[in-house]
Image: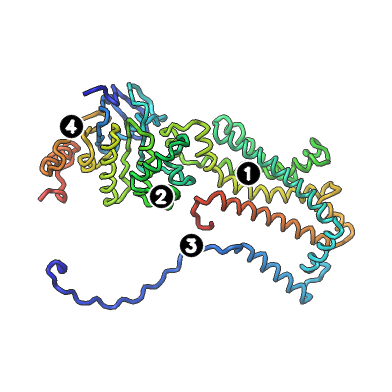
């Protein structure tokens, strides 16, 4: 594999509000889609916040090497309510990106909504605007902190499809923080498991489209998280 | 199951029409709806005067205010005094408003500024405006600067307090967003802080404008040779209740007009907001 997009060595975070990190090493290749799985309190959000550079409240040590252009998607769409959709997408960018912003809105299926106010959109649409805001910056790394956690199940499936399509087209490295094994299996090339502030497993997702293979990996991941097979989801 | 096996379900019993639930919100606002209260008050006053229940020596009839007002306009006294009063209130409001906004930003955006400024403002807030007038006279004399200063102080507090608390209430999540988007300090200020504090500032401006008119009444009756307050004081000396009434009506209209103007600006500037009262 060529030079990593993301390189993390011995990352420690001792004092944070959202969990500690206990020596994390992680490389992400350019264009690689990595899902970061873990229970709540395992330190997944702490790791993501450290990469996003917004962990001012944290204390710790370690090395982080990141590409220059990073976009972050939060669990809430985090649109500014006093700006129309287009202005939210281009926030902080020079004026000449309007064309690209309109194109990004088109790509997330919100063409023609650029003059809407955020409160006029549904939760899923707001999150799609957030996705357009992230994409228009042409990031080499996309950080997403449970971006679909607040959406209903149907919208979530649509968003999975959209995110997969867009990441295949634009090829950023992606770090997706999630606690949803199915989401990780549906989207990621690689799944990294975080437990107690340490990486406890690192596996490549194999055979997407092969249901038995996916079910097998799902079972393995569940076992790693310390959850037995849940009876409701057992394959027939 | 039934649908799959093709069995026909018995027709459901007819439903009772659903009772329409009364909405809990106040409903759609009407244009100029806020004129209703003042209109009713005027009607009440007019009826009492017309039927003779209200002695004109106690309070002249509303139409007396109009005729006397017309007379004063004809003489030129009303507009001259009104211009003087308006200029005083406007310059006081401007000075107090600019100071209020600047200090609110200083104390809202920097920790040190907050420690220094906010404490002092909160202390001084407890002192009534009337109590500082003797000092104002001592410092600024009895001329125009003193009047403008008193009005500015009165207008300063609500504008400072509302702007400051709106600044402090800006969601930390937006600050995080600004950091991840790589906004410069200036972009952060312009795109997030100022729009976020604008509703608070406009609310403060409404209170501040009212406070400015109130302070104007006080200073113009203290020592003045022009202005609406002077006109009223003079009329009091000659027991001209109708002129005094014109003064009151003018004050009321000015206060109401300013408040409506700020509310109009609020609606124009805050179209993005969806609130109960609108």
Which tag is nearer the camera, tag 4 or tag 3?
A: 4
From the image, which quarter does the N terminus of chain B lie in? bottom left
Which tag is nearer the camera, tag 2 or tag 1?
A: 2
Mark 4 element type = strand
- Mark 1 lies on residue: B159
Percent position of residue A192, x then y: 22, 32
Q: Quadrant of residue A33?
A: top left
- Mark 4 lies on residue: A203
Q: Which mark is residue A82?
A: none
Percent position of residue A147, x then y: 32, 42
How many residues crowd around disc 3 within 10 Å: few (fewer than 14), some, or many (20 or more)? few
Percent position of residue A193, x then y: 22, 33
- Mark 2 lies on residue: A113
Which residue corresponds to the image point at 36% horizontal and 24% vertical from the top-left? Answer: A60
Q: How far apart are marks 4 and 1 (CA)?
A: 58 Å
Q: Distance between the residues labelled 2 and 3?
A: 28 Å
**A70 lies above or below B10:** above
How many residues crowd around disc 4 within 10 Å: few (fewer than 14), some, or many (20 or more)? few
Mark closest to the chain's N terminus, 1 or 3: 3
Q: How far apart are marks 4 and 2 (CA)?
A: 40 Å
Q: Which chain carries label 3?
A: B
Q: How far apart are marks 2 and 1 (CA)?
A: 36 Å
Direction from residue A77 to residue A211 in the image, left or right? left
Percent position of residue B231, x then y: 84, 54
A98 or B9: which is nearer to us?
A98
Q: Which chain carries label 1?
A: B
Which residue corresponds to the image point at 56% horizontal and 44% vertical from the top-left? Answer: B198
How many residues crowd around disc 2 within 10 Å: few (fewer than 14), some, or many (20 or more)? some
């Amino acid at each position: 594999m060529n030079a990593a997009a993301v390189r993390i060595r011995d990352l420690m975070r001792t004092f944070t509000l959202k969990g500690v990190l206990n020596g994390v090493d992680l490389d992400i290749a350019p264009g690689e889609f990595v899902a970061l799985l873990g229970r709540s309190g395992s330190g997944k959000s702490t790791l993501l916040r450290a990469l996003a550079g917004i962990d001012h409240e944290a204390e710790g040590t370690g090395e982080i090497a990141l590409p220059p252009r990073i976009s972050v998607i939060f669990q809430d769409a985090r649109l500014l309510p006093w700006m129309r959709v287009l202005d939210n997408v281009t926030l902080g960018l020079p004026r000449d990106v309007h064309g690209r912003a309109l194109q990004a809105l088109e790509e997330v299926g919100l063409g023609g909504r650029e003059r809407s106010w955020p409160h006029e959109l549904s939760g899923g649409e707001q999150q799609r605007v957030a996705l357009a805001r992230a994409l228009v910056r042409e990031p080499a790394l996309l950080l997403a902190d449970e971006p679909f956690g607040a959406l209903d199940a149907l919208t979530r499936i649509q968003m999975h499809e959209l995110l997969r399509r867009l990441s295949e087209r634009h090829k950023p490295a992606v770090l997706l923080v999630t606690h949803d094994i199915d989401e990780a299996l549906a989207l990621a090339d690689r799944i990294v498991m975080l437990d107690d502030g340490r990486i406890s497993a690192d596996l490549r997702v194999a055979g997407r489209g092969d249901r038995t293979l996916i079910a097998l990996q799902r079972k393995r991941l569940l076992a790693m998280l310390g959850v037995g097979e849940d009876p409701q989801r057992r394959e027939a | 199951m039934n649908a799959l096996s093709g069995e026909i379900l018995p027709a459901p019993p007819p439903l009772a029409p659903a009772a329409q639930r009364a909405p809990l919100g106040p409903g759609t606002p009407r244009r100029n709806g806020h004129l209703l209260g003042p209109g009713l008050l005027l009607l009440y006053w007019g009826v009492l005067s017309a039927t003779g229940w209200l002695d004109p020596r106690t309070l002249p009839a509303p139409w007396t205010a109009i005729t006397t007002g017309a007379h004063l306009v004809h003489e030129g006294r009303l507009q001259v005094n009104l211009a003087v009063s308006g200029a005083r209130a406007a310059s006081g409001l401007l000075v107090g408003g600019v100071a209020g906004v600047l200090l609110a930003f200083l104390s809202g955006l920097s920790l040190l500024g907050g420690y220094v400024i906010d404490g002092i403002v909160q202390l001084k807030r407890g002192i009534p405006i009337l109590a500082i007038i003797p000092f104002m006279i001592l410092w600024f004399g009895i001329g125009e600067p003193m009047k403008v200063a008193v009005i500015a102080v009165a207008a300063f507090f609500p504008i400072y307090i509302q702007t400051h608390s709106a600044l402090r209430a800006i969601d930390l999540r937006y600050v995080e967003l600004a950091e991840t988007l790589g906004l410069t300090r200036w972009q952060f200020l312009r795109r997030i802080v100022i729009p976020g504090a604008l509703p608070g500032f406009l609310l403060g401006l409404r209170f501040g404008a009212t406070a400015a008119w109130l302070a104007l009444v006080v200073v113009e009756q203290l020592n003045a040779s022009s202005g609406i307050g002077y006109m009223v004081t003079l009329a009091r000396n000659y027991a001209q209740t109708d002129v005094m009434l014109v003064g009151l009506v003018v004050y009321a209209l000015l206060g109401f007009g300013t408040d409506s103007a700020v509310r109009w600006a609020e609606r124009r500037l805050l179209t993005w907001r969806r609130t109960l009262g609108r």
